[in-house]
Amino acid sequence: MSYRIGFGIDFHQLTEGRDLWIGGVKIPFDKGALGHSDADVLLHAICDALLGALNLGDIGKHFPDNDPAFKNIDSKILLQKTFQLIKQKKYAVVNIDSSVCLEAPKIMPFSDSMRTVIASILEITTDDISIKATTTEKMGFIGRGEGLVAYANVLLKKIKTQNEW
């Protein structure tokens, strides 16, 4: 059986007047992530990890930020489209390990909801998804509340067809 590992990372500025979406869940906060889409940093990192595992480029290649079709798009749609590319290559997701780094708000109360959203899109169980959160202990742009970052690792496995048995 063939396995592939992918790594993804995404950064966004935090700004007033935007909703904060992380892992497909709207998080109550006075700032949101700035971006062409809904700027869901976690879903973007997962998309990049999936694409990278199969050498399919990155999220910017498939969903460029200068394309009006993706203006304010729900990142769950980007994850669905990315997963379709993975399925076309005959791979399935084994598991995801991810971390979100931001000073505030605390996101772990929302992690079960995030895992449920992601699992439903990627056709895996919530037990196959790890979401962790950390801060930078008030250091740097994250510590000053200016932005956030997400990291994701994915493991994919090749799906054997009936003819391959």
Image (cartoon, helix red, strand yellow):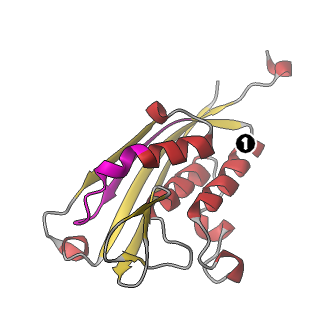
Q: Secondary structure at mark 1?
A: helix
Position of residue 19 relative to residue 135, above or below, is: below
Question: Which residue is at a point 64% across and 75% down the rendered structure image?
Answer: 64
Relative placement, left or right, of 53 versus 22 is right
Position of residue 33 relative to residue 107, above or below, is: below
Mark 1 packing: few (<14 Cα in 10 Å), some, or many (20+)? some
Looking at the figure, which quarter contains the N terminus?
top right
Give 140 or 164, whichever is nearer the viewer. Answer: 140
Relative placement, left or right, of 40 versus 64 is left
The range drawn in magenta is: 94-112
Q: Is 109 inside the magenta-drawn segment? A: yes
Relative placement, left or right, of 64 versus 163 is left
Question: Which residue is at a point 53% across and 47% down the rendered structure image?
Answer: 118
The spot of residue 105 in percent (x, y) is 26, 64
Looking at the figure, which quarter contains the C terminus?
top right
Q: Is 11 inside the magenta-drawn segment? A: no
Question: Residue tagged by mark 1?
Answer: 87
The spot of residue 76 in percent (x, y) is 59, 58
Position of residue 1 relative to residue 52, above or below, is: above
Give, as a three-letter code, the residue at label 1. Lys
